[in-house]
Image (cartoon, coloured by chain):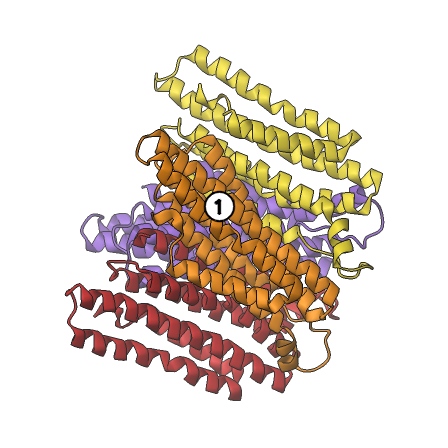
Chain colours: A red, B purple, C yellow, D orange
Amino acid sequence: MTKTRLEAFSDGVLAVAITLLVLDLRLEPEQSGGLLDQLVAAWPSFAAYVVSFLVIGVIWVNHHSIFRLATTVDRPLLFWNLILLMFVTTIPFTTATLAGALAEDSPADIRVAAVLYGAVSTGFAVAFTLVYGRITLALVRAGSMPGAARRSALIRFGAGTLFYPLLTVVGVINAPAMLVGFAALSVFYLFNQTGARE
Amino acid sequence: MTKTRLEAFSDGVLAVAITLLVLDLRLEPEQSGGLLDQLVAAWPSFAAYVVSFLVIGVIWVNHHSIFRLATTVDRPLLFWNLILLMFVTTIPFTTATLAGALAEDSPADIRVAAVLYGAVSTGFAVAFTLVYGRITLALVRAGSMPGAARRSALIRFGAGTLFYPLLTVVGVINAPAMLVGFAALSVFYLFNQTGARE
Amino acid sequence: MTKTRLEAFSDGVLAVAITLLVLDLRLEPEQSGGLLDQLVAAWPSFAAYVVSFLVIGVIWVNHHSIFRLATTVDRPLLFWNLILLMFVTTIPFTTATLAGALAEDSPADIRVAAVLYGAVSTGFAVAFTLVYGRITLALVRAGSMPGAARRSALIRFGAGTLFYPLLTVVGVINAPAMLVGFAALSVFYLFNQTGARE
Amino acid sequence: MTKTRLEAFSDGVLAVAITLLVLDLRLEPEQSGGLLDQLVAAWPSFAAYVVSFLVIGVIWVNHHSIFRLATTVDRPLLFWNLILLMFVTTIPFTTATLAGALAEDSPADIRVAAVLYGAVSTGFAVAFTLVYGRITLALVRAGSMPGAARRSALIRFGAGTLFYPLLTVVGVINAPAMLVGFAALSVFYLFNQTGARE
């Protein structure tokens, strides 16, 4: 298994997942009122679409930043990358669930949906850290990265994943604020590369 | 981030988005009449499918024309390209919404759906101009393009984006005419490359 | 626009289209009887799935056979290839429509659905011939193919497209026979390459 | 037809198929109770999603292991690979059917759905063996693999496919146990490459 193939397959999955988000931009035709009212009522779908598009887009950018470091692809790396992709492809579902709860305006459901959205995001952040740990472990073993440098890089990288459960807690209190937080975090990570650069 | 990866991911997203258009070619089985009547009643779906297929197809062609110029990929370029892709992947939704409004034959809804279709098209035209501006800025900075050449190229490129709000206005008056306009504009851009060539 | 990019985008569209066929393998849960009865009643979906999978798969194989010949990619070739892809991505829709009509067992609807399936197939066969004609025209102009060789190759290639309207006529009389015909034609073309080889 | 193209198309189909699994993570909004109850009731969808994601992911890994051996791509290999892909793209359907039957908790339907899931899995295991047989046949003919080595490798490879009908039988008795079995088999194959390595 070469790195090129792993990247090409991951790119394919991420490209499909990011595009499938559009399938949940659906209006409810049975709703009363004209199309304009329906579009306005569907604002949570549009907001969640934009946020999740940014989230997956930035995962793709950072996936490449991290894999640029990789020199070998072994079985555990394949496994953790598969788990990472599994969490990412779940995002269209958690996005639709959150948008649906917000559209129905039921506080209890919004809380559950926000936790679901945040939990899956935390899941891919953890999987990302495991992928990063595996790639840098190979570098340390090959003698091209000092063990101490890996430890400090992993700590910096892992610290970033703490934002995800934190935003999940924000979501329990205020789901739209959580969405704003995820969008801001994504744009921040897009312009300020993850620890992978060091 | 290399140019090749950016192009491969963009190709993937555009290929999925163009193919997802088919999911909105759905007949309403509850409608009275045989299959032939249903197919005839679904003409707006077919018309919108053909137009949006041409629109996304030509975006793909011109995406390559523009990125052939690019020599470096920096973070702002990544960001604007992501925004461009976000508008393009929305097209299956705006297409389905417009086709639905035309099928229901409600003048008020058709007007709203035409504005939505035109607004998203204007969105990707603006994002395209920002992507083009960023690519040519890098060329000017690298000394491989004179600043004056970039300014005039950007003006020519930006002038093309004026067609999109213009067609949106046409759509408020007559949505099918707007669709014909978008198809004609796409075929024109397919055979007459954008300002990127100069 | 390089040939590699055109092939990669076409591969992407064909891969998505062939996989979207699965979305129409849906059971009707409201139907009386257990799951086994539902699966048996859905036989037209399974039959149409297998046939359309073979049809798109073989289009992919022959797309490569033909583009191996291509040396340049000009705008008309881009255009005809886009039209070819547009017909191919319509196949999941015509497949679902035909399977639906067969499941409902309404002779009039089956006839309409068979003509629709056959017409789209004829459409991509004609587009394929235009793509082939454009590629060989460039070869003749570059002096690497004699004009007479192109004419006879085009006739052989075009003759193959006659099977498509012929099978459409068969479909008006007996739709399952048409499906068997399309499957047989695809397997034949898979093992006996099109005129492109000569 | 080069090996690279075959692999790229297969990667595309597998990437789309694995991502389409998310479309069946749908909650039934008409169900009574809040979102949390709906999520809990949808546990079979989540379990089947994870298992099928692992199954397709490992098919992708082993597809590459096998094709690394291939030196030529002939028509029969193209055909068997297409049949393999056809079975794999059916997995989102069999997954949804099994999850649906488990959610409805009807023992008769669960049995039918488990057999369907197992039969399709057996189908791709058999197609995989035929692909492997074709690739190694070319190696023997080219003189780069002794005939006896191929025979023993094929027996080892084919023995692995026996797990699939075996798990199908388990599914008739207990469908969740079958899912656990498929997940375990996938993880085993991910870490212990198939006979292809020898």
Looking at this rendering, what residue extends furthest in the bottom direction? Answer: A173
Q: Nearer the viewer, residue D150 or B79?
A: D150
Q: Is residue D191 above or below residue B189?
A: below
Residue B158 visible at all: no
Q: Is residue B195 above or below residue D50?
A: above
Q: Is residue A22 above or below residue B194?
A: below
Position in image of residue D171 (x %, y %) = 62, 62
Position in image of residue A160 (x %, y %) = 33, 78
Quadrant in the picture for the N terminus of chain C: top left
Position in image of residue B134 (x %, y %) = 31, 57
Quadrant in the picture for the C terminus of chain C: top left
Q: Which residue is mark 1?
A: D128
| SS under mark 1 | helix
Query: Which quarter of the picture shows residue D74?
Result: top left
> Which residue appears at 69% of the width and 35% of the height?
C179
Position in image of residue A53 (x %, y %) = 47, 65
Looking at the image, residue C140 sits to the left or right of residue A179; the answer is: left
> Which residue appears at 73% of the width and 46% of the height?
C43
Q: Nearer the viewer, residue C162 or C53?
A: C53
Looking at the image, residue B117 sits to the left or right of residue D77; the answer is: right
Looking at the image, residue C1 sits to the left or right of residue C95; the answer is: left
Q: Nearer the viewer, residue A102 or B147?
A: A102
Q: Is residue A140 above or below residue A180?
A: above
